[in-house]
Amino acid sequence: MSPIEGLVSLRGKVALVTGGAMGIGEASAQLLAEAGAAVAIGDVNVPAGEEVAHRIVARGGRSKFVRLDVAELSQHQAALDSVTKEFGGLDLLVNNAGIFPFSPALETTPDLWDRVLSINLRGAFFLTTRAAAHLRRSGEGAVVNIASVDAMRPTGGLAHYDASKAALVMLTRSLAVEFAPMHIRVNAIAPGGIETPGAQAALGGASGSSPPAVQSFLSRIPMHRMGKPDEIARVVLFLATQLSSYMTGAVVVTDGGYLVA
Ligand SMILES: NC(=O)c1ccc[n+]([C@@H]2O[C@H](COP(=O)([O-])OP(=O)(O)OC[C@H]3O[C@@H](n4cnc5c(N)ncnc54)[C@H](O)[C@@H]3O)[C@@H](O)[C@H]2O)c1
């Protein structure tokens, strides 16, 4: 293996990607597997998640699907046990599962608030703390949290989501400090608009009936296009490998220039 291959290789490593059945999570799972990792797909969507795992295995990779609702803390240990039993440990956790249901603040119910925060923030925190014992044993443990540019600039109609992602950014920084002595790096990615099934649904499909806030979001991207899931997966790979060995507590903005415009 050449030195450059060694830097991007995840051979012998084990990853768990939450929300890995579609979108950014699916693209990340595929790319991590291509880099040599055994990849567990943790998701609530059983058929789609199993399909992703099958596709990775069909291409010669190692993968398995684990049914996991990150909002249900009682499921965390069983999911981690299943992954570590099958693959012998855990080196990388990608906290990607997230929902972004548009709701003006004045119409947001306590139930919706709790649902968004339970998945996007509470689930990520407790899964990470549960996983820490395994990541510590790795010696090169890494956590990648998928935040959002909404952590830094509100889109509108997503106050609950924006709060969850801003908190996830701070969680990234806090855990980076606490976990550094355990040789676990904790970083985040702040994607801009990415073409995923979830974003497509938020945009109102092809009907153009997207909320005005979303249309204004799109018009503000200097690169004049949304990103592809694989363009976030590549940053996940960067933060997962020794390419980023001296990075922890960082937030990598990946947004086609949206935040600087
Ligand atoms: N698409 C974008 O424009 C964009 C921008 C910024 C940040 N993000 C973030 O990226 C992440 C992925 O977004 P996406 O656009 O790929 O979403 P998506 O809706 O296309 O896919 C999300 C996946 O997460 C799974 N999921 C949902 N709730 C879950 C739960 N409770 N437990 C486990 N899995 C669950 C879904 O089944 C699905 O497979 C999210 O955290 C999102 O907030 C997306």
Image (cartoon, rainbow, N blue to C red):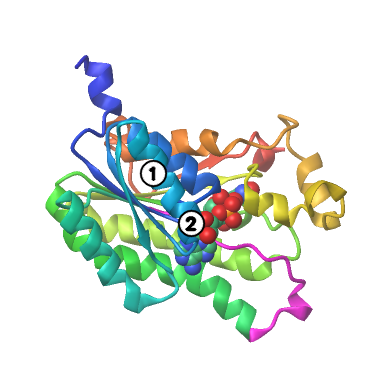
Reading the chain from its start, which is encountered first: label 1 or label 2?
2
x, y percentage for residue 214?
Answer: 78, 52
Q: Which contiguous range is marked in magenta? A: 94-110
Residue 74 vs residue 144, the one in the foreground: 74
Please say if the residues under marks 1 and 2 sit with CB atoms less than 8 Å apart.
no
User: Could you say which disc has been placed on residue 3 in the image?
Assistant: none
Q: From the image, tell me which residue sits under label 1.
A: 54
Height in image: 99 above or below 249? Answer: below
Residue 25 vs residue 6, the one in the foreground: 25
In this rendering, the count of numbered labels is: 2
x, y percentage for residue 4?
Answer: 28, 18
SS assignment for the magenta stretch, majority: loop
Q: From the image, tell me which residue sits under label 2.
A: 47
Would you say 17 lies left or right of 90 here? Answer: right
At 87% across and 54% down in the image, what residue appears? 209
Would you say 25 lies left or right of 103 here? Answer: left
* Label 1, label 2: how far apart the Cα atoms are: 10 Å
At 76% across and 47% down in the image, what residue appears? 217
x, y percentage for residue 41?
Answer: 38, 52
